[in-house]
Amino acid sequence: MSLKEIDLHQQLKKYFGFSQFKGLQEEVITSIVKGNNTFVVMPTGGGKSLCYQLPALIEEGTAIVVSPLIALMKNQVDAIRGISSEHGVAHVLNSSLNKTEVRQVKEDIANGVTKLLYVAPESLTKADHVDFLKKQKISFMAIDEAHCISEWGHDFRPEYRNLRQIIQRIGDNIPIIALTATATPKVQEDILKNLGIPDAKAFKASFNRPNLYYEVRPKTKNVNSDIIRFVKQNEGKSGIIYCLSRKKVEELAQTLQVNGIKAVPYHAGLDAKTRSRHQDMFLMEDIDVVVATIAFGMGIDKPDVRFVIHHDIPKSIESYYQETGRAGRDGGEGHCLAFYSYKDIEKLEKFMSGKPVAEQEIGHALLQEVVAYAETSISRRKFILHYFGESFDGETGEGASMDDNVRYPKKKHEAKEEVEL
Ligand code: ADP
Ligand code: MG
């Protein structure tokens, strides 16, 4: 189908019911429909799925979507089936299917019904799948969560490393679309290199969150009272407090409760029922604060989280960005407060000591960036965006005044005195 014949807005409305594209979606989709290798970097929630779903629905053949998590794939397939009445328009191909189911999926693909085929990378390595797909009309390959390819990413998956080879076995000229929310230049380089698409048309959304206020305070033995004071000053507002360990989560949640704050704990050690109850209480605003490990947050879309506190500093700037990014999704106020002590860095270093040397080196380098962020006296927004390869004008950029360093500039010796030894 030539691009001239397609009205993308009309297709957007028809399939998704939206009347506007979000951010760079239209440009990305145009690039994909033209058959370009395409690279998309957009923050979480930016609308990356639609960038490949819409072209898949309007192009001839089947688009193969590589995704790391079965749960994510299932969600997406259910959502697609909700928007198209055609049975079999989206399928998952993975190890959970029995022989009959696999046969059905393949029949739908061969008949041209299936527009989106979600696969885990390990399913793609199976010889009979590859042999089958080779004979089909494949519109393009989309690699979602493409940072899984890179050891510098926060979610490295070795299976992602074989994708290039597999894609080549399926077909020579299949366009490749890589999508990620990880913006660091190192990870991006790895993605393009590993997928063999240095020529890809790249679309990068800004990672600036101008409504978020960034603040770092020294972590002293009074950190709990500092947190209690902050939460009380923000009474009635929703917030998340991240801690490193489950134990700390439990302790702090209790301390807050004792102090009259409506808080619940959340971590992977709680049973599924309790976790989902606590999550619901937060969404329904029966409580104000969730004290959590990093297990909390993925896929939680509460638009009016007003603060994110880090009781413990995270292990990378990416994690910090992801976690603070859960504040102020609605564009309203979002206060991001991190408590920092170098002792916590040493603790994180120690956790890594059992790991392979290469991993330790990467972990160490990522941590050093966290130290630099915590100890910097320049604009924190500028630091974060620079880390993500984006330049930011500290004078005129959007949100330029929204951090402690800019608002309350410190002289160097003052900053030092505050740090507890
Ligand atoms: P990402 O993968 O980038 O994190 P998603 O693809 O999950 O983001 O999309 C995030 C949300 O944005 C979803 O709820 C999706 O329905 C919504 N969305 C995507 N595109 C549009 C659009 N053009 N208009 C309105 N909402 C959109
Ligand atoms: Mg996504």
Image (tube, grey):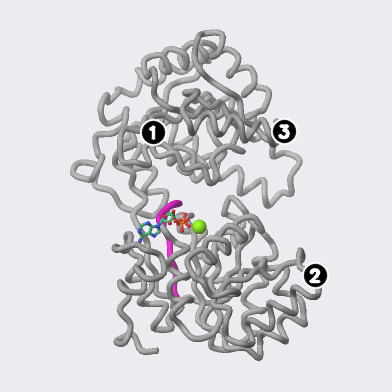
Compared to residue 140, the image places residue 9 above or below, namely: above
Which residue is under mark 1? 376
Which residue is under mark 3? 271
Q: In the rendered structure, which amino acid carries the disc numbered 2?
A: Asn
Q: In the rendered structure, which amino acid carries the disc numbered 1?
A: Thr
- Whole-angstrom CA distance, mark 3 to mark 2, is 30 Å
Q: Counting other residues with Cα less than 10 Å from the Cα at mark 3, is it few (<14), some (14-19), or many (20 or more)? A: few
Residue 163 spot, x, y in % from top left: 64, 73
**For residue 329, side relative to residue 125 (left or right):** left
Q: Is residue 44 magenta?
A: yes
Q: Earlier in the sequence, mark 3 or mark 1?
A: 3
Camera-nearest label, 3 or 2: 2
Camera-nearest label, 3 or 1: 3
Residue 392 spot, x, y in % from top left: 28, 48
- Whole-angstrom CA distance, mark 3 to mark 1, is 40 Å
Residue 260 spot, x, y in % from top left: 50, 9
Q: Earlier in the sequence, mark 2 or mark 1?
A: 2
Residue 42 vs residue 239, the one in the foreground = 239
Q: Is residue 82 magenta?
A: no
Residue 51 vs residue 191, the one in the foreground = 51
Magenta residues?
A: 38-46
Residue 267 spot, x, y in % from top left: 65, 32
Residue 207 vs residue 381, the one in the foreground = 207
Q: Residue furthest right?
A: 99
> Which image quarter holds the N terminus?
bottom left
**For residue 175, side relative to residue 271 (left or right):** left
Which residue is under mark 2? 98
Element assignment for label 3: loop
Element assignment for label 2: loop
Q: Give me the residue at 37% from left, 49% from top.
A: 386
